[in-house]
Amino acid sequence: MTIDDILQKVNEENDRAVIKKAYDYANAHLGDRRRKNGDLQINHALAVADILGSLNVDTTTLISGLLHEMIDVDETLADEIKELFGEDVLNIITSVSMINKLEMVDDSDSSALYLRKVMVGLCTDVRVLFIKLADRLHNMRTMDCFTPEHQKKVASETLRVLVPIAHRLGIYAIKGELENLCLYYQKPNVYNDILEKLNNTTIELDDFLKEMKNSISTILTNNGINFEIKGRVKSVYSIYNKLQNGKKWEDIYDILALRVFVEKESECYAVVGLIHSKYRPVPNRFKDYIAIPKENMYQSLHTTVIGPGGKYYEVQIRTYEMDEIAEKGIASHWSYKEKGTKRVQSMMEQKLELYRSMIESNEQSEDKEFTSLIDNNILSDLIYVFTPKGDVVELPQGATPIDFAYRIHSEVGDKMVGAIVNDQMVPITSSLHDNDVVKVMTSPNGKPNKDWLSAVKTAQARDKIKSYFSKKDRENYIERGKSLFEKEARKRKLAIGELLSEENINKVCNQVKLKDLEDIYLAIGSFRYTAYYIISVILGTNLEDSMVVKSRVIKHTGNDFDILIEGEKSIQTHLAKCCLPVKGDDIKGVITKTDGIAVHRDNCPNLKGYEDREVEVSWNYEAESSYSSYIIFNATSEKIDEVVLALTTSGVKVLSINEKTKGTFEISVSVKDKEELDKIVTSLTKIRYVKGARRK
């Protein structure tokens, strides 16, 4: 491979000059530097540029391919590269350099996930992906000198991360070769077995292909159609995939395949009609990707017919331009402004932005959850369905009419009440399939159902449904908070207007870090604070510091003399947070190193192992104090406000409430002793919405 081989693929003289300049620059800095396999680095740069050249990419991409290792050679070259070849080239090769430093540390899903996250985050320009794919393809072609372990590791990463990207970009020439190479390195025995089977039947298969080619050629020539026809045997990896999916060798219909190339789109339909008039087509195997192109711009007619020898032949018919796009993907249109570059760039930028937005919204998610999002929305097999007007909608495999509705518009999804697929009413949670025509039925009274969350496949639909319920929940919480506040005020015989003066609202907002009255109602309605607490803040009542739901810090509210140590009041004590004893509990004291004596309930499991530090303690019943304690109970979320109201109406001081798990609540109350606490637990069990109340 020489630079002249690459320059021959470039039409413009000016472009050839700057590409030659880039090569000379790379050669000067790479010199005789060699790669791990012993090859010269400059030869690798040429090979990458050659692969890119076969895709008909633009000059900027070719230059970037030649220079893609320059930053690794010397980081100080960045300013010089920018000055000589432009900012776009520098940005592209900087991204490629960063991506090439990453690899899967093991074969786990989390490792693959991390690589996907970072790779997509760095790819602000889709041309970075073109170079990454070309770089990996040449690396895979030259891996024979490495250990089998290294080969398998690189193959696994390629198959799980890069092959799906090549597929989405429509670069099937690279995708197919990468797949074959991955299988060759990962499962050499399987690869060779399939290859041997193909080779054993090569003469027979070639004879059948030749007979079919001659027959089609005669038909088309007799009908005055100018054409070119090529025959091929299915790729090893493609056959492997079909065998893995349960197909038997003899049931693989499209091992024998032909492609017919014509000048005009109208001739594609004429060709398929002529072939069908001679050979019987296999039902449900005809696909029209010309009238309905794939999102990556792929166009072709596909049909499978029964031909010579009773064999199945897959025939693809396309124009020469369609074939260029089919093999080289959107890269082939990158440099042609008149053929929709802006549309292509916009489409790919949207894809990359979808990756990035998913990454940002799931930074705190478990790896498993994010992996599922990526697999379902980006790397999964796609289906193409249609609106009644014929517009194409791309969705992941297994998507439902709900996903379709939210892809059209969030309001369509929110108002959806039914779906008609191919003129048949179907459940809105049913799976859609390729070429389905979907009509969404809406109603002004329609609204999402939370069960939809488990049915949808797209992150977009899931986020829109969650957003709807977040907004709805907020409205409900505000309404509930207002109701609870007013009931608490009436119970205390307080004027609501005076309580909600501007001064009092500001006082509450400043003390508990809320924004306005609506936020106060929201905090009460969502049980972040109780109405009892908010009114107490307004009145200036002394309460526990720990009033916020989910806070585990409980401060004792009594004086320092609640506990007697051998009749003494002045010894430093504190109530243990692990069991929260209240006056009347049987208690024991444990001497601590730094915090005096910790007082536990005598059945507290944390006393075990501290027998040698135990001291006798007792309650000072002359002291008047209050104590915080927790009660656990089960109730439905819809009725929890009535439970709280029932308690507060009976005089119970409810400090906070927290839903620990679905239907299980933890409530904090203020009591003067164990007798009062036991009465509260008993009164809870008598509320019809409550089950299983117990002290924590």
Image (cartoon, rainbow, N blue to C red):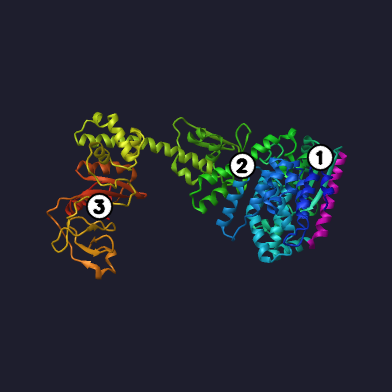
Q: Is residue 623 left or right of residue 119?
A: left
- Determine the CA span between mark 1 and mark 2: 32 Å
Q: Which residue is mark 2?
A: 351
Quadrant into which the C terminus falls? bottom left
Q: Secondary structure at mark 1?
A: strand
Whether residue 44 can be seen here: no
Nearest the eye: 387 or 628: 628
Q: Which residues are magenta?
A: 199-222
Residue 141 forms part of the magenta stretch: no
Whether residue 463 can be seen here: yes
Name the mark nearer the viewer: 1 or 3: 3
Magenta stretch prevailing secondary structure: helix
Amino acid type, mark 1:
Val
Q: Which residue is mark 1?
A: 262
Q: Which one is earlier in the sequence, the residue at label 1 or at label 3?
A: 1
Nearest the eye: 70 or 425: 70
Q: Which residue is mark 3?
A: 629
| Circle number at residue 492 | none
Name the mark nearer the viewer: 2 or 3: 3
Q: Quadrant of residue 527?
A: top left
Residue 202 coordinates in the image, percent (x, y): 81, 59
Q: Secondary structure at mark 2?
A: helix
Q: Which one is earlier in the sequence, the residue at label 2 or at label 3?
A: 2
Amino acid type, mark 2:
Lys
Q: Residue at 15% across / 50% down in the picture?
A: 624
Q: Secondary structure at mark 3?
A: strand
Q: Quadrant of residue 89?
A: top right
Residue at the extreme left of the image, as rendered: 622
Amino acid type, mark 3:
Ser
Q: Residue at 73% across / 39% down in the picture?
A: 333
Residue 479 coordinates in the image, percent (x, y): 33, 34
